[in-house]
Image (spheres, coloured by chain):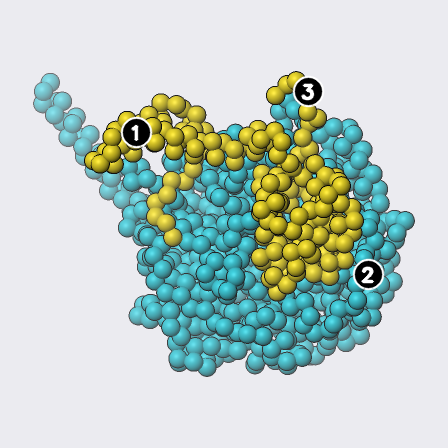
Chain colours: A cyan, B yellow
Amino acid sequence: MCWRKRTSIWSFLASLAVAFISAAPVAAQYQPKNTEWPSYDADLAGTRYRPLDQINASNFKDLEIAWRIKTDSFGNRPEYKLEGTPLMVNGVLYATAGSRRAAIALDAATGELLWIHGEHEGARGANAPRQLSGRGLAYWSDGKEERILYVTPGYRLICLNAKTGTLIPTFGNNGTVDLKLDDDQTIFPDLTTGEIGIQSAPVVAKDTVIVGAAFREGMTPRSMKNNKGYVRGFDVRTGKRLWIFHTIPKQGEFGYDTWLNGSAEYTGNTGVWTQITVDEQLGLVYLPVESPTGDYYGGHRQGNDLFGESLVCVDLKTGQRKWHFQLVHHPLWDMDISSAPILADIVVDGKPIKAVAQPSKQGFLYVFDRVSGKPVWPIEERKVEVGSVPGEWYSPTQPFPTKPPSYSRNGVAEDELIDFTPELHERAKEIVSRYHLGPVFTPPVASKADGPLGTLTLGTASGGTNWPGGSYDPETHIAYLFACNSCVEPIGLVPAPKEVSDMRYVAGVAGQEVTVMKGPGENAGADSPMPPKKPAASTYFRMNVDGLPLIKPPYGTITAIDLNEGKILWQIPHGETPDIIRNYPAFKGRDIPRTGQQTYNIGTLITKTLVIAGEGQVSTTADHPRGAMLRAYDKQTGKEVGAVYMPAPQSGSPMTYMVNGKQYIVVAVSGGPYSGEYIAYSLPSENE
Amino acid sequence: MTKRESALSAPLFVVAQLTAPLFGNLSRVLTRHTSAYRPRSTLRLAGLLAITAIFTAAYANANPQDAAPSDSRSVWDGVYTEEQAKRGEPVYHKECAPCHGDSLAGGESAPPLSGGAFLANWNGLTLGDLFDRIRKTMPQNAPGKLTRQQNADVLAYTLSVNKFPAGKNELSRQTEFLKEIRFNSNKPEPKKLGTK
């Protein structure tokens, strides 16, 4: 008996050892002492995924602030729109920060400032179309040297020694490449004021740095002519230009004839302002291209306008186009392609496919074979409404993915209007009665004072998934996408006053003076003097009822999509029900399910078991003081498993890493009265 | 940079504020650290008072309407005049609309100044907070360009677009005065006489 017992103990210990040994490689794979976040999206595949699990469902609520850093001093004024996601390599955290868009390095465990680099660009910075701290930077190493690369507001590529923050003298011109030069076009009117820049992070793949371009907001362009947003690859060692891809083809190049009447010559924009992804093994780069000049009016660029709003695959070594797919023909809705394509190795009907999945503002997830460009599930050309704006050209059809189903609203119908009470519903109906309504791809209308004032759209400028993009788990093949499900955009067109633009139509409302929309901090008097202003008509067309959103909940959602099946697994509202709804007198005593929030710039982070995302709006509840919550959901079910307090809304997407056996989550917060701050959370020591 | 601050975990926050015995524990902690040179009882009282003050401040923050003195004003009390809003309108259109839009709906890179997101951003704070944010950081390309009076007028115009009622007195251009006016997104229910 005794002997047998001993045997059983030994066999138990042996099996334990076996279990431990067999589990060891897995543990080593998933819980290394140091786990890095070396690229803006965690990796070049755009996953925003790290398989860490020290912070999990059981302890998320216990998170404490490990360290924090305000960004006020990284510029001559504070910034209230901190959008960065830091990188973490080798125990050092790198980020862009402050109104100067400084590059900073911090000790990843303590937050201690190691170095800072700022570029004082004077008038060139002040004239930049995309200012403030930007979204981040890129890291490169050959095993010996380490470099940090980022683009300044004035559109210069900066290369720094990652250890010291000093410029690399052998890169470009003493550490700098002027991106307004050597661009196969002459940036007009001059290098100081010429409109072109970028706010996203460059990417580095196999010693090539890839940089896109961004412009002013495109609703009220000053001209049908603008600089073009080409994409270039540079040698990370020397700064030498290796290749260029013409997002608007030059004469003789493929796609030139999709711009009628020679409009490819003068039309601009069409840049890649969001994150680029790369498959280093295949040597392929995926470029999400934005709208051409004139977000809502394309009468001066008739035709399909390639590669506007197209996903383009180019060769990493040469920049040569391999394939492309235009998501929107002749773009008229500012749909852009606003976020990083996601690389996903999936299995469909038993067949492995190297796929690329593209989230969008219009709530479609477009999935392609990333080698051939062929849609994984059919994408059908379907007839859409043809509009009647004078001079406009319309594509009679648009592509509709058949799978997966759309994951956020992309059209406005009366039954989607607020319906907490019949009275609110009636008031919402009255507001929308002055607009043209319809499903996705309902075109803009010329605004008339007696109606329609415009086309009321959802899933356009600020709908669906915007620049923060989605997340993807390469083990389960599930994508997680935040979407604004209620961001309505009225799109009306008015004849452009000559002093404002040479376009025939720009965005506006009949009876109101046209205001030229600008990017952040853009110099108000830069190029063309503004016309003298008289008070605009005092009628305002509010897209809310008593401050309540016009559209019914959920206002913002996170959706899990199985990419093997092309189906939605779950969808949840993300974000506390806004104060104005919880405290609305007529709803007193009513149990309103969580509504989520009407915000468009929320990024998700996924770990081994959690989906993590902060709120984009402030609330004050019985459970927490004025602030926003960083929330964690079970990846399998979407059920919330914990939340931790932030003093301000999430304004940049969260990231995670492990240093010396401790997992951290870092998130950028700012907005309203709260200036930018990076906050690092970790578990209290006893929980590790 | 501050190291290891407690991240206010929601339920814990309320529990900590409302559980009276905890005050005793915390004051004991304070006592332990400083008892070498002060009488214990005084310190315990000081600790309790300090904690009570923190409690009151935090609770006031969480429930501004409940904790504000009954005579404190909010944006619902007619704190600007129609004439002032009219003065602010052209200033808004010249200096603010290029980023925040003609209808205050915001742009791709500037937050809305009307509707739910705007109300959520400022709910629970004061007009002084909003005024100073505008005064010190706007317009973004030339902060401080507008005079205090212009800023107050623009603020009045913003309140009018958000349908907060106008009244007989103009909005002050002094931050201290504006700090006395609460920004509450929800209209308070009519006060009932004889009840608290």
Q: Nearer the viewer, residue A549 or A463?
A: A549
Q: Amino acid at mark 3?
A: Leu
Q: Where residue A256 sits: x, y (%)?
A: 71, 74
Using residue A131 as the reference point, say whether residue A491 is left or right of it.
Answer: right
Looking at the rendered structure, which numbered label has been put on residue A147? none
Rounded to the nearest whole Å, what is the CA distance between mark 3 and mark 2? Answer: 47 Å
Task: Check disc 3: other Cα within 10 Å, few if <14, some if 14-19, many if 20+.
Answer: few
Q: Do discs 3 and 2 belong to a common subunit? A: no
Residue A117 lies, with reference to residue A685, above or below; the image says below
Select label 3 or label 1 by which is in front.
Answer: 1
Select label 3 or label 2 by which is in front.
Answer: 3
Task: Provide the chain ID for the residue under circle 3.
Answer: B
Q: Where residue A403 sits: x, y (%)?
A: 63, 46
The residue that mark 2 highlights is A534
Q: Nearer the viewer, residue A175 or A582?
A: A582
Rounded to the nearest whole Å, what is the CA distance between mark 2 and mark 1? Answer: 66 Å
The residue that mark 1 highlights is B42
Residue A404 lies, with reference to residue A537, above or below; the image says above
Residue at 77% x, 28% y: name it: A422
Q: Amino acid at mark 2?
A: Lys
Residue at 47% x, 34% y: name it: B58
Q: Secondary structure at mark 2?
A: loop
Q: Secondary structure at mark 1?
A: helix
Q: Where residue A74 sits: x, y (%)?
A: 46, 62
Q: Is residue B12 visible?
A: no
The residue that mark 3 highlights is B193
Q: Amino acid at mark 1?
A: Thr
Rounded to the nearest whole Å, what is the CA distance between mark 3 and mark 1? Answer: 42 Å
